[in-house]
Image (tube, rainbow, N blue to C red):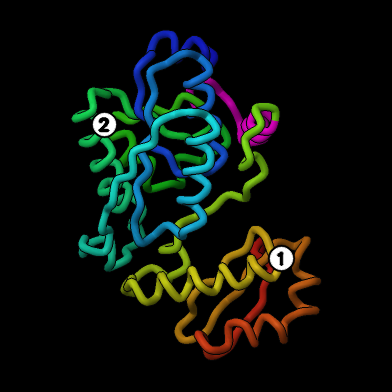
Amino acid sequence: MDLKEFFKTNNKVAVAFSGGVDSSYLLYAAHEAGADVRAYYVRSQFQPAFEFEDACSIAKYTGVDMKVIEVDVLSDETVTSNPEDRCYHCKRVIMGNVIRQASLDGYSLVIDGTNASDDIDDRPGARALKEFGVRSPLRECGITKPEIRKLAKAAGLSVWDKPAYACLATRIPHGELITADKLKTTEKAESLLYEMGFRDFRVRMRGENALVQVTAAQYGEAMARRNDIAAALGTMYGEVIIDDITR
């Protein structure tokens, strides 16, 4: 089965949309296949501003209507307590809201951008998707991440080479309470590094310190500019530690 066949059989779908390359290409493919499709973007404290901006840009480019759902994830005590399976509980909150709104709008099938390269056995959130009956056409059709990037580039999608992005909550160690202040600090720190020209990195909280993880290709530059990085983040953290994200 390919995507055209999928959307021929399932021609009315709601896309759980993040603005990343996977869900962006899925949205584009559904529209190109002639399906009745609507995008649902959940805006919460876990998503930085640039994710929403990317989502708006892609929705406009594809011509697909995007509905924004405001969700206060910090109101869920299980999520904020940050257990090992936090992603499962968070995904239930997010997808529950998407499914309810999509149903009110007349969409009974919700799909997401999980692809054939994703290791769903290692993703607690995948269990929530299964429980809700959310389908993943890219995975069902055997389309891998590298293939999606090529297809997205050919389609003219601006996010085709966008690095994979995990939500801000992943920067806080499991078992440590997630708060709005910690999330805002993380978002500000990562925005500063982005403005300095770095791509594909994480700023993780380690007590009062920041663990800045960059790709191996950027590690040399990060070390050469470690004083600049420390100065930029120094007002928010005690010590700033630079590491290779692949370790």
Q: Quadrant of the C terminus?
A: bottom right
Residue 34 drawn at (x, y percent):
46, 13
- Left or right relative to 85: residue 7: right
Number of labelled discs? Answer: 2
Instruction: Give me the disc on residue 102.
Output: 2
Residue 40 drawn at (x, y percent):
35, 38
**Residue 152 included in the magenta stretch of the image:** yes
Instruction: Say above or below: 24 vs 233.
Output: above
Identify the residue at horizontal 63%, vertical 70% (top origin).
193
What is the magenta segment's predominant secondary structure?
A: helix
Instruction: Give me the disc on residue 66.
Output: none
Tell me if mark 1 has few (under 14), some (14-19) or many (20+) residues whose alpha carbon lies within 10 angstroms of its own. few
- Confirm whether residue 23 shows in the render: no
Identify the residue at horizontal 38%, vertical 13% (top origin).
11
Q: Which residues are magenta?
A: 139-153
Q: Amino acid at mark 1?
A: Gly
- Left or right relative to 85: residue 158: right
- Left or right relative to 125: residue 235: right
Identify the residue at horizontal 60%, vertical 84% (top origin).
240
Instruction: Give me the disc on residue 197.
Output: 1
Q: Amino acid at mark 2?
A: Ala
**Residue 30 included in the magenta stretch of the image:** no
Q: Secondary structure at mark 1?
A: loop
